[in-house]
Image (tube, rainbow, N blue to C red):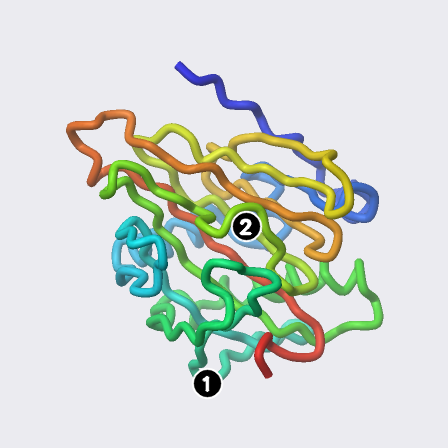
Amino acid sequence: MTMNILPPFTANPALIATLQTTGYAVLNQLNALQLVACTAKDAEAWLPSWNDLPPDAYLKDGGHYRRRRHSCFVVNGESALQTEHRAHWQPLEYNALHGGMQRMFEPMRADVVQSSAWTTLLSKLGEVCSALKPQTTTWFVEAHQFRIDTTDGIGRPTPEGAHRDGVDFVAVILINRHGIKGGETRVFEVNSPAGQRFTMTEPWTLLLLDDERVIHESTPIQPLDTQDSDASYRDTLVLTFRAQAFQGE
């Protein structure tokens, strides 16, 4: 059996200093929920929406292992306003596999994005971003719900490989892992081979990344039970924070 490497967890009081020093930080469930001022009950209320994600029709590797929804928000202080639905776009510089495409995904469900806990989540993470870049108070946020499954025998959380997202900051929240092995997270410094690898296994583990300083990827997942691969999956919520505008504007 493959042994998972535990994440290098950071305590909340050291969060900003850790991000400034290393370019990334990982919070366990308790600290993550405290940071974003959400309760376990708030988090559980969103879980059914991951069972309702449409297939990703844009996978260039021919796979059928990814489902997702996508919505955009403008966050300023305690305000988090959803924008008119828009396509997700990245330049080829940051996503060699799917960059340069206008990818229009189904929006996130109203019961998630209209909840007070969702607004609090975005505003609290926006506060972290502004603490790192005090000159910026307004953040253009793209939210992605992902389910990577093993329908094809293997699922690829990051089919584009190690990458940056072309934003200022990225938050990756593990929602659930079920019946899988793999899915190791790897974070590397942009200009050196120095890096860290670990596996997020506890729901609501939160990885925060300074996208200008580090690149990241997650390794493929495989089913623990090859006879029941349809029930093997990894659910995440990925939030990107960018100053000035959304990518492509």
Percent from the top left, x then y, of residue 57? 29, 64
Residue 126 falls left or right of residue 39: right
Percent from the top left, x then y, of residue 81? 54, 79
SS for callout 2: strand
Kindly identify the amino acid type of the residue bearing the numbered disc 2.
Val
- Asked if labels 2 and 1 touch by Cβ distance under 8 angstroms, the answer is no
| Residue at the spot 37% in from the left edge and 65% down from the top edge | 69
Residue 74 falls left or right of residue 158: right
Specify the label residue 84 is tagged with. Answer: 1
SS for callout 1: loop
Percent from the top left, x then y, of residue 46? 37, 56
Total numbered labels: 2
Percent from the top left, x then y, of residue 60? 36, 59
| Residue at the spot 70% in from the left edge and 36% down from the top edge | 10
| Residue at the spot 80% in from the left edge and 58% down from the top edge | 132
Q: Is residue 110 visible?
A: no
How far apart are the alpha carbons under marks 1 and 2? 23 Å
Residue 99 falls left or right of residue 228: right
Q: Would you call the spot at circle 1 few (<14 residues within 10 Å), some (14-19), or many (20 or more)?
A: few
Which is more toward the observer, 71 or 187? 187
Quadrant in the picture for the N terminus: top left
Specify the label residue 172 is tagged with. Answer: 2
Quadrant in the picture for the C terminus: bottom right
In this rendering, the answer to whether 89 lies above or below 7 is below
Kindly identify the amino acid type of the residue bearing the numbered disc 1.
Glu
Which is more toward the observer, 236 or 14? 236
Give the quarter of the image for residue 166: bottom right
Q: Residue furthest top?
A: 1
